[in-house]
Image (cartoon, rainbow, N blue to C red):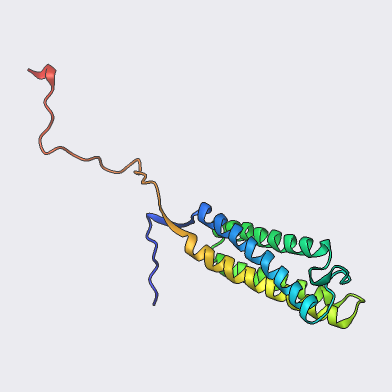
Amino acid sequence: MAQNPYDQNTRPGIDAARLWAGGVATAVVAALVAIVGMLIARGIFDVPILAPKGEGAWGSASTTTYALFAALAALLATGLMHLLSVATPAPSQFFGWIMVLVTLIAVVLPLTLTVDSSAKYATAAINLVIGLVIAIVVNSMAANARTVHRRKRTVPPDAPTQQWNEPPTNFYDR
């Protein structure tokens, strides 16, 4: 049987500064994953993603927008993890399920569009990789940002007070 690492005087917490610093780093990684995915799809396989390939492998302004949305998704995931870490008993489990379902939506959505099949599959694949990267990195980084907080010690009103070894002398009793 596993022992509880927390006793009655401690509670789990999260180092918000470390969590959000990792969230910003995750946003940069997610944006770069989106750019690399688009460069591979457009530059190597000649498949348009979200917009026609009119500006070479980089595409149009949609590449920058796609990368910014990937970064925004990473920041939203960090905010979600922060909220779950302070408000739920098993934040990693809830975060994992939410991220699986959101990633699934991002993968299925392009498949429902009426565009070329190769563009559908390439966009779905890029969305899958971005979702997995965000989920794995944010979950891992949040585990490293977890802390243990000591509870403030409160004394119950009916608790006995500490007694002196000798009774104190009273100045007026002399």
Q: Is 30 situated above or below 167?
A: below
Q: Residue at the left extreme?
A: 174
Examine the image and state in which quarter residue 58 appears: bottom right
Is residue 104 in sight in this rendering?
A: no
| Closest to the observer, 25 or 111 | 25
- Position of residue 52 measured from the top left corner of the image (x, y, whole percent): 89, 71
- Position of residue 86 measured from the top left corner of the image (x, y, whole percent): 55, 56
Q: Residue at the front extreme?
A: 56
Residue at left offset 10%, top offset 19%: 173
On the picture, is 90 further left or further right than 56? left
Examine the image and state in which quarter residue 91 appears: bottom right
On the picture, is 143 further left or further right than 133? left
Is residue 158 in sight in this rendering?
A: yes
Residue at left offset 53%, top offset 63%: 142
| Closest to the observer, 163 or 52 | 52
Residue at left offset 87%, top offset 82%: 117
On the picture, is 101 further left or further right than 26? right
- Position of residue 128 measured from the top left corner of the image (x, y, whole percent): 71, 76
Q: What is the total number of numbered labels drawn onto the structure image?
A: 0
Q: Residue at the right extreme?
A: 114
Q: Is 36 situated above or below 9?
A: below
Examine the image and state in which quarter residue 133 appears: bottom right
Q: Is 156 situated above or below 63?
A: above
Q: Quadrant of the C terminus?
A: top left
- Position of residue 10 measured from the top left corner of the image (x, y, whole percent): 40, 56
